[in-house]
Each structure stands twice: as C-alpha cells, then as structure tokens.
Image (cartoon, rainbow, N blue to C red):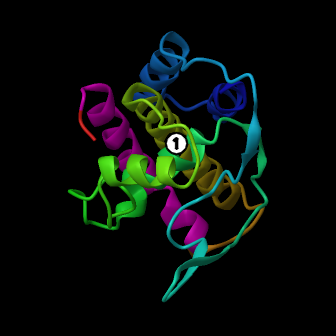
Amino acid sequence: MGQYRDLTDLFGEPHPAFELGLRWLGENPPPQRADPCLVHGDYRNGNFIVGPDGVRSVLDWELAHLGDPVEDLGWLCVKSWRFGVNDRVVGGFGDVDELLDAYERAGGARPDIDTLRYWIVFGTLKWGVICIAQAFTHLQGFVTSVELATLGRRVAETEWDLLSLLDGGW
C-alpha cells in the first residue's frame, strides 16, 4: 500500500477519494498470511487465455510478487474489469460466491468476504493510481500516447467506484 501512497503524493494532485481509500485500507487490513504465495498482480479477463476446458494460460506476469493470493481474486473483481456488466462482480461474468466456492474446490482456503472486500478496495485504488501515472506520463511528454491520455479520464471512474465500495457496495 505504501507505494500507492507515495505515488499519489508524488503527482501533487488532490484526490480525496483516494485519501479515504488509503485511510480505509490502513484501518482494515486483512489478517497477515504466514505463508505468502506467488501473486500474479494483474489477474483479470484480458490476461488469460480460455479454451473449451477452461483457463489455458495466464499472460502478463510483470506485476508478480509474493503476497496474499486473495489479492488476485480482488483484482479480478475490480469494477473496471466488468466492462459494463456490473451485476456480475467477478470480471463481469461471475458472482462472488461462485468465485469463492471454485477457489476452495481448487484447493485454496476459502477467503472470508471481508478479506476479499479489502483486496477489491485495494485493487480499485491501485488501478486509479495507475491511471494517474499513465496520464502523467503522457501529459509530461515522456510518452505521447492517446491511450495514456484517455486513461486519465478513468481516474474519476475509479474514484467513484472506490467511494461506492467504501459505502458498502460492490
């Protein structure tokens, strides 16, 4: 969480919703795992290949790190990856209970809902800060890119999503 606090401060722009999110994350940490695992860091539809028999490959491992595997489940549930199918919390195609049941069936300990919520809040904040960074990269002229510029508008969406989460929504 510290790196996202540092990045938010670095850009020198006010983002009260992110400040609330950072405070909430600091006040509501999940239990620390004694056994950190490999976390993908960007596990979402768009970064896996699916075949008739299920997921066949997972792409884009540059954000991989050791941590809580529920972080990947939370990232998959970030509203931005639902692509408008907002009633299906899991990537726009599944429900939370289905995800947790499948995770347990696959051999993981069933995460509690508060831990999953923590990681969804974290993922939403993370995506918002990434959007700021991408827009900043364009605006400062480091890389001129329409894609990076348009990610700047996504900041307001993630702020709204974060406020909704903090108010108890999904």
Q: Residue 162's image quarter? A: top left
Determine whether 125 is above or below 61 in the image.
above
Quarter placement of the C terminus: top left
Residue that lies at the very extreme toward the top in this rendered image: 27
Front-most of residues 22 and 35? 35
Q: Is residue 25 visible?
A: yes
Image location (x, y in percent) of residue 153: 43, 56
Image location (x, y in percent) of residue 147: 57, 72
Image location (x, y in percent) of residue 54: 51, 78
Rendered residue at 31%/33% (across/down): 165
Rendered residue at 63%/42% (across/down): 69
Front-most of residues 46 and 151? 46
Question: Is residue 78 found inside the magenta-colored segment of the image?
Answer: no
| Dot 1 alpha-carbon crowd within 10 angstroms: few under 14, some 14 to 19, many 20 or more | many
Count of marks, rendered view = 1
Determine whether 5 is above or below 146 in the image.
above
Determine whether 33 is above or below 135 in the image.
above
Rendered residue at 52%/35% (across/down): 122
Magenta span: 147-168
Front-most of residues 31 and 79? 31
Q: Is residue 108 left or right of residue 89?
A: right
Three-letter amino acid code at the position of disc 1: Gly
Q: Which residue is mark 1?
A: 123
Q: Is residue 78 visible?
A: no
Question: Is residue 167 found inside the magenta-colored segment of the image?
Answer: yes
Quarter placement of the N terminus: top right
Rendered residue at 68%/24% (across/down): 33
Front-most of residues 97 and 104? 104
Q: Is residue 128 left or right of residue 80?
A: right
Dominant SS in magenta: helix
What SS does tag 1 mark? helix
Image location (x, y in percent) of residue 103: 50, 51
